[in-house]
Image (spheres, rainbow, N blue to C red):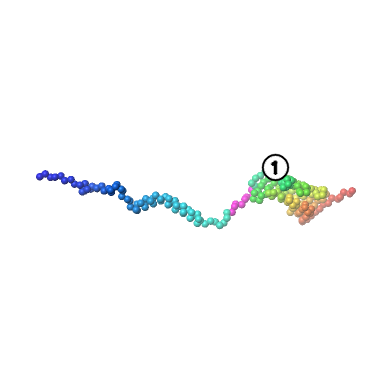
Amino acid sequence: MAEADTATPASSRPGTLAPAAARPGGRRTPQPLRWRLVELLSSYLPLLLMGVLAMGTWWLVKNTPLSDDPRIAAPLRHVPDYEMRHFALQRFTPQGQLRAQIEGDVLRHYPDTDTVEIDNVRLRAVGPDGRVLHATARQAIANGDATEVQLVGQAEIIRDGIDGGPPIDFRSEFLHAFIDTESIRSHLPVTVTQGGTELRADSMEYSHLDRVIKFGGRMRAVFSPRESK
């Protein structure tokens, strides 16, 4: 008796997977909601990290305590910021008239005190009345606008006399001249000479406007005899 061959369906064969049945119309099966949230977060994760970093930086800057102490500027050192050699400086009035002229070998300007030091100074000042003052010294210290000049070392000031009289000569190791007030001071021994008269004292104050000389300490005077007519 002949045996009939029987075909076994592929789905019933052991170890064989049957293809998934396609949905009508060829549509794909939609992904679960969890996977869609994961994809969304992964797309916006760099932007979220940048936002968090910016917020953290803003919070840190806002909450960082600031020092209440103001910053103290470093004090200026007493060193010259510029020098001039063999110079001549002139100061004029608002009307254009020469008020003072200062010459010297070396000038050094100090910004911390706004003063100048001059070696071998030579000063010429003209008063409102036209009388002239000449001054020399080994060194001078003047303020920024040259209204005060301190003469140090063999200081000498010669100014025109009053009412046609002989000039007045001041000599000392220190003389302090005030140009605007036309006064001269010295706390060191000073010699004042006018004509044949010589006065020596431990200190002195002279005011040209008041035409008064005040001497301090010990004083010695030498008067020359008047010539007989």
Instruction: Name the residue located 16 percent from the left edge and 46 percent from the top edge.
Output: 6
Q: Is residue 152 visible?
A: no
In the image, residue 66 lies in the stretch drawn in magenta: no
Instruction: Name the residue located 64 percent from the left edge and 50 percent from the top edge.
Output: 112
State the residue in front, 147 or 141.
147
State the residue in front, 138 or 46.
46
State the residue in front, 171 or 148.
148
Report x, y in % for residue 44: 40, 50
Q: Which residues are magenta?
A: 72-79
Instruction: Name the residue located 48 percent from the left edge and 54 percent from the top edge.
Output: 58
Q: Main secondary structure of the magenta part?
A: loop
Count of labels shown? 1
State the residue in front, 56 or 219.
56
Residue 72 as seen in the image, left or right of residue 128: left
Q: Residue furthest top?
A: 86
- Disc 1 on helix, strand or loop? strand
Q: As shown in the figure, which amino acid type bears the numbered disc 1?
A: His
Residue 65 as seen in the image, left or right of residue 32: right
- Residue indicated by mark 1: 86
Crowding around mark 1 (Cα neighbors within 10 Å: few <14, some 14 to 19, many 20+) is few
Report x, y in % for residue 98: 74, 45
Report x, y in % for residue 121: 72, 46
Residue 78 as seen in the image, left or right of residue 4: right
